[in-house]
Image (cartoon, coloured by chain):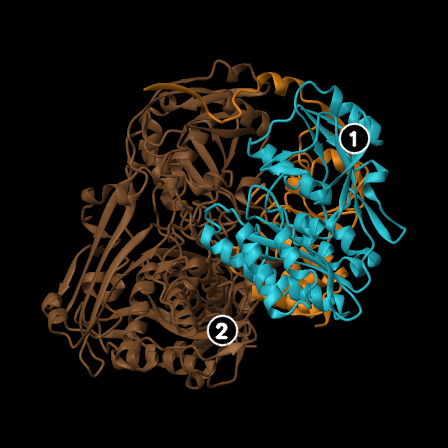
Amino acid sequence: MMVETPTTAKGSHADAVATASVVALAFSINGRHCAVETVATAMLLDVIRDQLGLTGTKKGCDLGACGACTVLADGRRVKSCLALAASYDGADITTIEGIGTPDRLHPLQAAFIRHDALQCGYCTPGQILSGIALLAEKPKDIAAIREGMSGNLCRCGAYPNIVAAIAEVAGL
Amino acid sequence: MSDRSVPRYEAALKVTGRAAYEGEVPAVGLLHAALVEVPIARGDVVAVDASEAERTSGFATMVSYADAEPLKPSPATALIRDRAVHFAGQPVALVVADTLSAARDAARAVRVTTQARPSVTHMAQALNTAYVPAMVGRFPSVSNRGDATAALADADRVVRHRYETAANIHHPLEPHAVVCWWEGDKAVVHTSTQAVFGTRAMIAHAFNMPPADIRVISRLLGGGFGCKGQLWWPWMFLAMLAAKKTGRPVRLELTRAQMFRLVGRRQETVQDLALGFSTNGCLTGIAHHVTAQSSTHAEYSDATAVYTRYLYACPNVTTSHLLVRTNEPQPVPMRAPGTAPGLFALESAMDEAAVRLGFDPVDLRVRNFADHDQEAGRPWSSNSLRDCYCIGAERFGWARRPAQGTAVDGRWRIGWGMASTMYPAIRQAAKVRVQLAADGAVLVQCGTQDMGSGTYTALGQITADALGVPVDRVTVELGDTVLPDGPFSGGSQVTASIFPAAAAATAKLRATIAAMAIADEASPLAGQRLDDLEFRDGSIRSRSGNVGEPWANVLARKGTEGLEAEGESGATQHPDLTATSMGYGAVFVEIGVNAGLGEIRVRRVCGAFAAGRILNPLLARSQYVGGLVGGIGMALHERTETDRATGRMLGETLADYLIPTHADMPEFDIALIEEDDPHLPGSVKGIGMLGTAGIQAAIANAVFHAVGKRVRSLPIRIEDVLGRR
Amino acid sequence: MRYEAPESVEKACQLLADDVGHARILAGGTDLLVQIKTDVLDPSLLIDIKKIQELREINTGSGGFRIGAAVTGAELKEHDGLRAAWPGIVEAANLIGSTQVQGRATLGGNLCNGSPAADSVPALIAAGAKVVIAGPNGRRELPVEDIMVGVRKLALTKGELIVSFIVPPRPKQGGDAYLRFIPRTEMDIAVVGCGVSLQLDADGTCTFARLALGAVAERPLLVGDAAKALIGSKLDAKAVDVAAAAASAACRPIDDKRGTKAFRIKVAAVLARRTIQIALDRAHGKTGTTH
């Protein structure tokens, strides 16, 4: 049986690509104003990493399951891989680059280092942004931290140390 | 906290998002790549037609088997040189374009014509083709000690069961990536690999070029767990071919879905295990026979039954491994390869035996402790397994274990279980270079890489200790083939391998500085005895005379810009060993089973591990806990399945393939039992694999203890727990 | 693919009606964007409804609630009045994915995604919520249980859009609850979900009950027999047993890797029992949790 197959169910989309609409966006990122032009289908993560060159925000699964791409948008944590950039026109975005520097660490970053709350480090920026948003929600106990952080996967298994770092900053 | 518990070397970069992973390396004129996959599970590629793709916006070029043909044949190039399709979703070409979305659109527009042939999409369909591979890793596939068949026939009690483990996927959170370009005939390859030198050697072979013309860089990995090795090479080669063809840098990053297929898996196993005992609880015979999956394009077998040859004292042991080739993705080592699935069977069966014989599970294991390596007939270099049982049991409170099936906490039925774990301690060849600057700064370099396991930190600490300087004076460079040859990151071997090389390099430097000081009239140490000098707090001092000075002063007076020395150490020479080295552990768990729903939660875990001297207790605990978390995933959640009709993976996302989350975490208590081992440099054994094995059986044993139901296949399904006893 | 972000319901309906390809409504995007990225869907037009004010609001009036279709789970949780009146709905909406997803995922999206396992839907059905639909011919209302007619199939016609959910006032001596079962502790798709709403009279007799199940059929189910067993009883063990058995009997699940048919049927009864108990505790004014 000889079969010619398009390589995916979707098949060829040469025409669609040619007509994909371009949108002009402006948002604040880590306190800096920025304007970009991007295709309407672009995700916030790809704009942040590829167009703005801020690679601290990681692409782990690209489908909203791992949390490595977590950023804060108007103070709320979102998975930027499942956030259409066009919907964030005018938003105030914070990425890991806006949290602290090696010389001036955010208290949660310092706690991560003390508790060894990271191994390979790839999930770490997302864990920290998620943790900062969670701290603002004032978790009442360790169980609340575990539940509130469950959108951030860590394959190295640093979970207990991550929770310990957040608990320390939360004063629990 | 111990003063050895220094924070992770690169932590500040990682917590601030400044840590650059290799797929993020910027390059001018970068092209983005996407792979073209075929849907058939077996057959041949007849044609790959890019004419439609060429008309998509941003398209640069396509490379396929026609472009790969000039590469030298090898296992690493076979998949891209041949037209044979071995598994569904196999890439047959790579497209590069100006942006990633343009590359993906172009890849979709490539028309592939295939000739499909009948495929085998599960082991069960081809058991009649099972064969014995020559070796399983560095061990023979088949072993016979004494006469296990006769011993089992004569045994007072026999426990005989079949155990099964599912295919697991490594899933480091950083997908495999490469950014590569050519500078004339020279190649620069930034890639997330666990082996920069192995990668360089395979590029040199495939492209028929001198290794010196290739630079492979892997300074930080976002995890590896065994999958950032050889199966990545073919796809990386396609990116290199595209870079050559276009004269531009190319970036290829795998999608999460591709990581289910293209870079390996923990192989699926079916294990038949029989344990024979005398009535007094002594093992008299063991038979452990494993059947496992491999692909049709490569051969790999975990050493699944190998550890059954070592763990317990038993005069009659037979083990074997069979492979069945299927049109499914190829397995490779994954976290605790062999021990994780093999000890699940052995340690589950030991628990069944304890119940049958009326022994406490810990007592039965202590009774069968192997006081020497019975397979090789030589002593252990050190073996603190009994301490692991004892200390672990004490810390867990094992003596208060309730009777089976009696403990409840609200809706939860509580069970306790335990198991042993082990992993060989071996070394690879390594070179380490240490440079001292005249201002006292230290630079240490090795071409090995850090997967996240702490190699930067360990090498910095080893060097700082040897030179008597604080760790923050030491700069560590890893992960680059321009650095001295270092080991691949795997098998829990890196720290043990680089330790003697770093010790040799620093010993040379100490000797040089000491000689300089003794011979220097201006030094307070002039004329001192060499063997009376020590390096401490950044100084060189006389132990007896209470004189000394900062060693930087010695260098400064000589007007030297600094010193440099290289140390080298060899790989473990197995035939020459006078003792066998392994790390050990005992893991104790408490689980709850939700009555009615059958939901299983691990509530607390105590792991007691003995693996030589611990360089950094903070990082060692992280390693053990991380391994245990991986083991919980294997025990309760992780399974990838093949659709038998199409050969495709069922569900290629992290929403389908469940790994443990924050909310699944129990309380962990880790006991570090330190050992002196005169046979090992610095008493260093690997620790990484120990946590990942053992806990699967401990959980299954705890499930039995809670609800009286034996589950002999992983992951444990809730249906298994709720079903008939 | 085009992107539009209209600021009125009428404009959104117009865009939907005029589109000759396959337009899709984008609310939180947590399901839609996954389907687009995995090539399950290839819409010609994305209509982002988050700029339509009416869809973003929770209005209280006459004791009940009007919840805009684009209100997120996180916003529901922050609404004290709704949390106090219908904790089951709020908890259900906050089981949709991770915290990051709850900040994006909307009630309308959870329903219109058309998954039988949608967490918020059984809770809304149990509460007796209605849906306001806008379309080319004006507005109409349907009970939530009539919206989903099959896997990914909705009772909406071309040009129609879900505007809001109308949730009745919390009955006096009433309580609701939602429980689901997943193999992992967090972040998974329901194997079975159960929503219950109850009302008691002064002497503790059940005067009103609704029980709905998710993930046990091609769409969420309102289990009338379960309600029948509860109404008129004092929610004694026998009545609850009959209701739980009715829940199991209503199931027509599939086998998949998350759970077998037999397991789902068994779990439906266990969950029904536990959900009824929490709703009952709440009707008595006790605070209960879903854990």
Q: Quadrant of residue C114?
A: top right
Residue C191 relative to residue B303: left or right: right
Amino acid type for the residue under numbered disc 2:
Arg
Give the residue furthest to the right. Answer: C62
Q: Is residue B57 visible?
A: yes
Residue nearer the viewer, C169 or B19: C169
Residue B584 relative to residue A150: left or right: left
Which color has been applied to chain B in this rendered view? brown
Instruction: Say the numbered circle drawn on residue C129.
Output: none
Q: Residue at x 81, y 51 (%)?
A: C168
Which subunit holds the residue at mark 1? C
Q: Quadrant of residue C141?
A: top right
Residue B180 relative to residue A58: left or right: left
- What residue does disc 2 label? B413
Residue nearer the viewer, B645 or B175: B645
Residue nearer the viewer, B109 or B690: B109
Q: Position of residue C67 (x, y in %)?
A: 80, 46
Q: Are marks 2 and 1 on the same chain?
A: no
Residue nearer the viewer, A57 or C282: C282
Which color has been applied to chain C in this rendered view? cyan
Q: Position of residue B502 (x, y in %)?
A: 41, 62
Screen quadrant of the N terminus of chain B: bottom right
- What residue does disc 1 label? C5
SS at badge 1:
loop
Which subunit holds the residue at mark 2? B
Circle nearer the viewer, 2 or 1: 2
Amino acid type for the residue under numbered disc 1:
Ala
Q: Which chain is orange?
A: A
Q: Position of residue C126 (x, y in %)?
A: 70, 52
SS at badge 2:
strand
